Image (cartoon, rainbow, N blue to C red):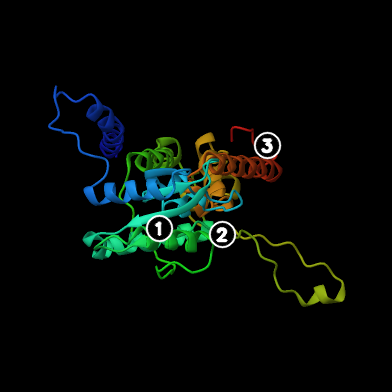
């Protein structure tokens, strides 16, 4: 058992240390080279947008996480953010106060792949939900300046829906990140503590109280059936003599029933642990709470349940101490 615990702890430590090791790699020089921020086609569209809107702000390669936020009242905000947190907008046309006028997406041949189609749908759904106009330029020749300005002003003015078909799309399973692994490590450590506590000698090998078998006791006297007893005459006392040696005489109840020792502290602790398992079952939302506030609430729920259980245990077992 301890070997398994040690292996799990080592794995968790390695998962947390590996990113730090990558930052301080033993390689003195990585085989990297710089590249332009935009492709030639994107650069051409950038300069045309700058010429069409000289008084506006134009940003490129903007993460949607900088443009959108989830309403604070939503309980599963992190799950919603996972649908668009890794998406990037090609161009963001903004006013002087940095409010977004429109998002311009420049497609190429790669957008026909299934993964890019799913990403484009999620991007369009996120922007539509936030009320941000989206102008999508398909692969091929760029539109003229007049057509480009007409499309932007038409979408920014709300005169026409975007060309993308909006539908709720289930996001594919996100790959594990170091941050998610670190959050999951807290739950793994908590689970290990529960397993160790359940398998500790104090709770698993508690001695059971001894049970003494009662020996049958032979009756030494019987009332003789006497018809005169019905008429109010007391029946004569009779006695039965047991034949045989003294060893054949069955022991008396006092001799065959030794005093049973009270349960030990370990037995009381095992009984209390079993009662606690039946009393409290943590909710499923407390297995891996993503937010710090959720972790605090789960801890508060546990403490309230523990306090109520201790009070009930003390009421049901007046002689037991708080440690029992």
Q: Is residue 201 left or right of residue 268?
A: left
Q: Residue at x 48, y 49 (%)?
A: 78
SS category of the residue bearing label 1:
helix
Q: Which residue is mark 2?
A: 218
Q: Nearer the viewer, residue 127 or 167?
A: 127
In this view, 77 is above or below 7: below
Precedes in sequence: disc 1 or disc 2: 1
Give the crowd class for mark 1: few <14, some 14-19, many >=20 residues within 10 Å. many
Q: Residue at x 82, y 67 (%)?
A: 234
Quadrant location of residue 313?
A: top right
Can residue 288 be seen at all in this image of the molecule?
A: no
SS category of the residue bearing label 3:
loop
Q: Which residue is mark 3?
A: 319
The quarter in which the C terminus is drawn is top right
Q: Nearer the viewer, residue 126 or 324?
A: 126
Q: Which residue is mark 1?
A: 123
* Residue at mark 1 to residue at mark 3: CA–CA distance: 65 Å
SS category of the residue bearing label 2:
loop
């Amino acid at each position: 058992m301890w070997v398994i615990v040690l292996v799990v702890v080592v794995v968790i430590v390695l998962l947390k240390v590996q990113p730090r090791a990558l930052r301080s790699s033993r390689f003195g020089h990585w085989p990297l080279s710089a590249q332009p921020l935009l492709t030639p086609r994107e650069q051409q569209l950038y300069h045309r947008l700058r010429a069409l809107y000289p008084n506006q702000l134009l940003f490129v390669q903007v993460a949607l996480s900088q443009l959108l936020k989830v309403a604070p009242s939503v309980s599963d905000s992190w799950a919603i953010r996972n649908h668009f947190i890794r998406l990037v907008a090609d161009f963001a046309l903004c006013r002087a106060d940095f409010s977004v006028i429109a998002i311009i997406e420049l497609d190429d041949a790669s957008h026909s792949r299934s993964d890019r189609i799913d990403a484009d749908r999620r991007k369009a759904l996120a922007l539509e939900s936030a009320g941000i106009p989206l102008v999508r330029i398909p692969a091929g020749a760029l539109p003229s300046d007049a057509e480009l300005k007409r499309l932007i002003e038409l979408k920014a003015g709300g005169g026409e829906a975007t060309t993308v078909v909006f539908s709720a799309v289930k996001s594919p399973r996100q790959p594990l990140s170091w941050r998610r692994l670190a959050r999951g490590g807290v739950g793994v450590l908590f689970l290990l503590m529960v397993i160790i506590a359940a398998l500790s000698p104090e709770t698993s090998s508690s001695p059971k109280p001894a049970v003494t078998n009662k020996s049958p006791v032979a009756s030494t006297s019987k009332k003789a059936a006497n018809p005169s007893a019905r008429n109010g005459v007391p029946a004569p006392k009779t006695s039965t003599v047991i034949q045989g040696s003294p060893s054949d005489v069955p022991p008396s109840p006092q001799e065959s029933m030794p005093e049973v020792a009270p349960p030990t502290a370990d037995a009381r602790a095992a009984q209390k642990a079993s009662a606690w398992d039946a009393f409290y079952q943590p909710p499923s939302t407390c297995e891996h709470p993503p937010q710090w506030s959720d972790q605090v609430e789960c801890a508060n729920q546990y403490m309230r349940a523990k306090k109520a259980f201790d009070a009930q245990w003390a009421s049901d077992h007046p002689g037991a101490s708080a440690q029992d």
